[in-house]
Structure formats: C-alpha cells, structure tokens
C-alpha cells in the first residue's frame, strides 16, 4: 500500500497537540493533526498571564479574569487570597479555546482531520503506519509518519501501545458541570473569584471548585476514590451554594494524570505530550499551561529528530520539561500527599493560606511558573510555619 507520508502525525488536538502542530508546521514540516471531535475536557479553565505571552494568545479568548481565590476549609471557614497588583487568573472556555488553537495550527500549515485513532502498525518500510476511522463503523484508513506524537489525553492509547508502563499512570477522575452564572454576585458566588473547597465530604483526596467563566461557571470536583460519587458532590455543592436552579449547559468527566511518565518516547519514532505524558501539576490540577509547554518541547524535539534522524533527540523534551518544572511538581506532590490526607490537615492548610507570605509566594510562583528565590527569608518563615502547622503547634482556626 502507498500511504501518504507526513513528517509528523499528531493524535489529539487539545492545547498540547495543537501547540506542537503549530510549531512544527511553522518550521516547514508536513503535519497531520487528528482530533476525534465532539469532546470537551472537564477543566476549570484557569490560565496565568504568562501563557498568553509565551504562546501569543489573544486576550479576547479570556471569558473572565479572576482577581482572587477563596479557600474553603472543612469547617466552612473561608480565606481570601487576592492576586494583588501582580496580575490575574485568566479563565478560558475549553470548547472555544481548544478550537482556536486547532484552527491556528491549520492556518499555520497543518492539516486537520476529524477521526478516531485506531493504532500504530509497522511493516518492512521505514516509517510507522497510523490507522484511523473517520466515523464509527467506517473503513479503516491509514497514513505514514516519520514521527508520531500522542497528545490523546490521560490513558492515552498511543502511550499504552508504545510506552512500557504507561497504563499504570495514577489518575484523579474529574467531573464538572457548566452552568449559567447567577445574575448577581453573592457571598457564595463571585464572578471575579475562584473558589476552592478543601472538604472531605466533597472530595476525600483532592478538592472541589467553582470557577467563573463570564456568563457561565464551572462547578467541579476531582477524586481518585472510585467509590466516591462525583455527581453527588456537585449536587451537594449546588444545593449548598444556592446554584441548584441555575441552568446546566453541559456535563463532562475525564481522568487527570497525577505524575509525569518516566519516559515520553519509545526510543525510535513515537513521543507523547500533555496529559498523555502526565504533565498536570499535583495538588492544583493545573494542566493547560504545562500541556502547552510540553507540546512546544515535544514539537522542538521532534523537529530536531526529523532534521538529524537521531532518535535520542526525542528524549530532550522530557529532560527540558523536568529541568524547568520538576521542582515545582515535586513540591506540589508533597503538598497534596500531606495536606489532602484528612480534614484535620485540610483545616490547617487553609489556615496557612491566610498567611501573607504564603499568599505572595503562591501567586508569584503561579504567575511565573517557578519557585521564587528572590526572598529567602520568606521561604524560611513559611517553612517554619508549615512545620508548625503540620505538627499541630499552631491553632487550626482563628
């Protein structure tokens, strides 16, 4: 059979896959972007201003700008964390945001195809065969690729087929409901504030949220506990917050990975990116920015591989990502392990969020996507306070 040969075939058109497609197409490579269509990932939609700058994203894609976050403890105590003068938390609607990214890839020279990925096959020829169906029950079609990029989300089919151990990646399952926002702000809902609930009754091992999206809002929850009712938790939240009568526009659920894969490539011609590579920040669940960074690194590694023919170049994507963000992921992972394990610790965690030093360094790290080193004394103070809270030497509430 004589299949069309592309430099890169990218499976998945989310932020990671679309970013890789755009970068590779702009670099002059032939790119096929395969997206199955009809799916919107459950996501709070928060993005830092740095994302807009780094990836040339227009402000018009923001549906809201949150100027503060509110942390709610198991006791119901709420701690406000204003962003201050350093910026804002941008909010995007994934349906519009992801489609804009895919269209940018197309305008940059990538081909778009709505189809469902089947598998990667090999024969005696040099390049792997990517098979897919354009419709359910339709005929299987195929193309060849010099490099395949799997950006098909958590539990990635590409990763499972090509990377050893990928199926064992730990995940939280996330579920949210997009509702019409209330007509006016109340103490329970503010269109300029992100609310995060650290309460075991709403999530035994993660958190729940209410994020404003302008005319709509995302009410969501995550948990790795398979016996926990996510829909029940959302129903409880909506009832508690007086949002039960707001029109529900859509409901979505999906797994979210908790840890980057130890290897992103197969040592030959396949590499994964985004959720498929596990690049979602622990504790916070933030994934859009990290997916796009990972997609860019994967695209650049793939371009170097295409130029040199050296498969070892694919490894540089993960090395670069972990060098830049590995420490932040480690700190957040430890935070989740300690502070999300019980309501007693969650209560102390929210109390800690009331500390001005904690708030300043938290927002600095969020905006700049790295640990802030400019104020070593503040880090020391936070370490001492953190230790005191962990040991129970400070009161959990004021």
Image (cartoon, rainbow, N blue to C red):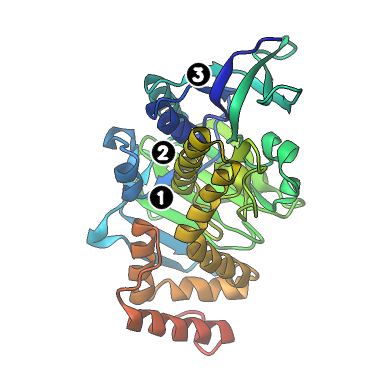
**Residue 218 in view (yes/no):** no
Residue that carries the numbered disc 1 in the rendered image: 189
Residue that carries the numbered disc 3 in the rendered image: 112
Q: Nearer the viewer, mark 1 or mark 3?
A: 3
Q: Are marks 1 and 3 in contact (CB under 8 Å)?
A: no
Mark 3: few, some, or many residues within 10 Å (few <14, many ≥20)?
some
Q: Are marks 2 and 1 in contact (CB under 8 Å)?
A: yes
**Residue 207 in view (yes/no):** yes
In three-dimensional space, the C-alpha distance between marks 2 and 3, rounded to whole angstroms, equals 34 Å
Q: Kindly state the secondary structure of the residue where label 1 is placed.
A: loop
In three-dimensional space, the C-alpha distance between marks 1 and 3, rounded to whole angstroms, equals 39 Å
Q: Toward which corner of the image does residue 55 lie, by quadrant?
A: top left
The relative height of residue 149 versus residue 232 in the rendered view (above or below) is above
- State how many labels appear: 3
Residue that carries the numbered disc 2 in the rendered image: 181
Q: Toward which corner of the image does residue 365 lie, by quadrant?
A: bottom left
């Amino acid at each position: 059979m004589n299949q069309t040969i592309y430099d890169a075939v990218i499976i998945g058109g989310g932020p990671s896959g679309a970013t890789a497609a755009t970068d590779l197409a702009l670099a002059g490579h032939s790119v096929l972007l395969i997206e199955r269509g009809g799916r919107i990932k459950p996501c709070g939609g928060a993005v830092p201003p740095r994302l807009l700058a780094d990836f040339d994203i227009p402000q018009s894609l923001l549906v809201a700008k949150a100027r503060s976050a509110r942390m709610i403890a198991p006791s119901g105590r709420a701690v406000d964390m204003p962003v201050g003068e350093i910026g804002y938390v941008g909010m995007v609607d994934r349906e519009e945001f992801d489609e804009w990214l895919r269209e940018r890839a197309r305008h940059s020279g990538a081909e778009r195809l709505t189809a469902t990925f089947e598998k990667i096959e090999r024969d005696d020829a040099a390049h792997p065969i990517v098979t897919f169906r354009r419709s359910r029950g339709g005929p299987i079609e195929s193309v060849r690729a010099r490099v395949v990029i799997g950006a098909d989300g958590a539990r990635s089919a590409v990763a499972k087929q090509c990377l050893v151990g990928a199926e064992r990646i730990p995940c939280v399952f996330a579920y949210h409901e997009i509702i019409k926002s209330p007509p006016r702000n109340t103490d329970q809902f503010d269109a300029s504030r992100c609310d995060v609930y650290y309460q075991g009754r709403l999530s035994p091992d993660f958190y729940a949220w209410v994020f404003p999206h302008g005319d709509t809002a995302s009410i969501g929850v995550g948990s790795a506990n398979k016996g926990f009712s996510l829909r029940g938790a959302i129903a409880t939240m909506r009832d508690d917050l007086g949002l039960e009568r707001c029109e529900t526009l859509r409901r979505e659920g999906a797994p979210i990975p908790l840890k980057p894969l130890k290897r992103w490539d197969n040592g030959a011609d396949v590499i994964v990116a985004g959720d498929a590579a596990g690049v979602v920040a622990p504790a916070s669940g933030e994934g859009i920015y990290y997916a796009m960074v990972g997609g860019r690194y994967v695209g650049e590694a793939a371009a170097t591989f295409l130029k040199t023919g050296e498969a070892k170049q694919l490894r540089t994507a993960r090395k670069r990502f972990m060098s830049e963000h590995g420490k932040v992921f480690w700190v957040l992972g430890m935070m989740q392990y300690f502070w999300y394990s019980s309501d007693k610790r969650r209560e102390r965690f929210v109390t800690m969020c009331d500390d001005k030093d904690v708030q300043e360094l938290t927002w600095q790290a969020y905006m700049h996507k790295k640990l802030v080193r400019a104020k070593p004394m503040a880090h020391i103070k936070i370490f001492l306070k953190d230790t005191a809270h962990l040991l129970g030497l400070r009161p959990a509430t004021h």
